[in-house]
Amino acid sequence: MAKTHVKMTVNGKEVEALVEPRTLLIHFIREELSLTGPHIGCETTHCGACTLDIDGKSVKSCTLFAVQADGADIRTIEGMAEADGSLHPLQEAFRQHHGLQCGFCTPGMITRAYRLLQENPNPTDEEIRMGIAGNLCRCTGYQNIVKAIRAAAEVMNGADAKEAAE
Ligand code: FES
Ligand code: FES
């Protein structure tokens, strides 16, 4: 099948490749770029394990072709920690509050939570639950994920307040 040239920014780096039009973005990200944090948990767009942050939106990358992401700015779980290795507050909070067990949903869950906290920096528990309704987890029962997102929001709001005061 004829390949199409695509160019996108992934975790701050420009990438270029030739892809078949039918290649799903999740396969491109995992197989071509070797970013294997985002996972595949279904074939019906329910689970959200494949969630990426694309141009400021949470997108299920199993439901987008790589060619549709031409020119996009993408963030995956691999791009969440700082360059010095320090964890994003969400990653830290998931660890502290036991918001993961098998870890399979976690990349998608954290990537979604990252965007949720941009959309709503101070969500109620109900808003968190609604906000991650596109992400399924088989292990945690969600309770600790909600706690972790709430805790991360507090840390992030605290950091913002500190920055504003400086
Ligand atoms: S793999 Fe399940 S929603 Fe994408
Ligand atoms: S931690 Fe196992 S699916 Fe969520």
Image: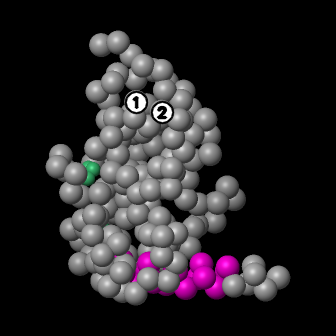
Which residue is labeled 1 in the image?
67
Point 57% across, 47% down: residue? 11
Distance, label 1 to label 2, CA atoms, is 5 Å
Considering the image in quadrants, where does the C terminus appear? bottom right
Under mark 1, the amino acid is Val
Q: In this orientation, which residue lies closer to the viewer: 83 or 131?
A: 131
Which residue is labeled 2 in the image?
70
- The quadrant in which residue 127 appears is bottom left
Q: Mostly what secondary structure, the magenta segment?
A: helix
Q: In this orientation, which residue lies closer to the viewer: 26 or 5?
A: 5
Q: Check whether the beta carbons of the residues at disc 1 and disc 2 lie within 8 A of each other.
A: yes
Rendered position, 40 above or below 5: below
Residue 20, position as x, y percentages in the image: 35, 22
SS under mark 1: helix
Residue at far left of view: 44
Point 24% across, 58% down: residue? 47
Q: In this orientation, which residue lies closer to the viewer: 43 or 34?
A: 43
Side of 31 relative to 33 (left or right): left
In reply to whether residue 150 is colored magenta, the answer given is yes
For the record, the magenta segment spans 145-160
Rendered position, 12 above or below 27: below
Residue 112, position as x, y percentages in the image: 41, 63
Rendered position, 75 above or below 101: above
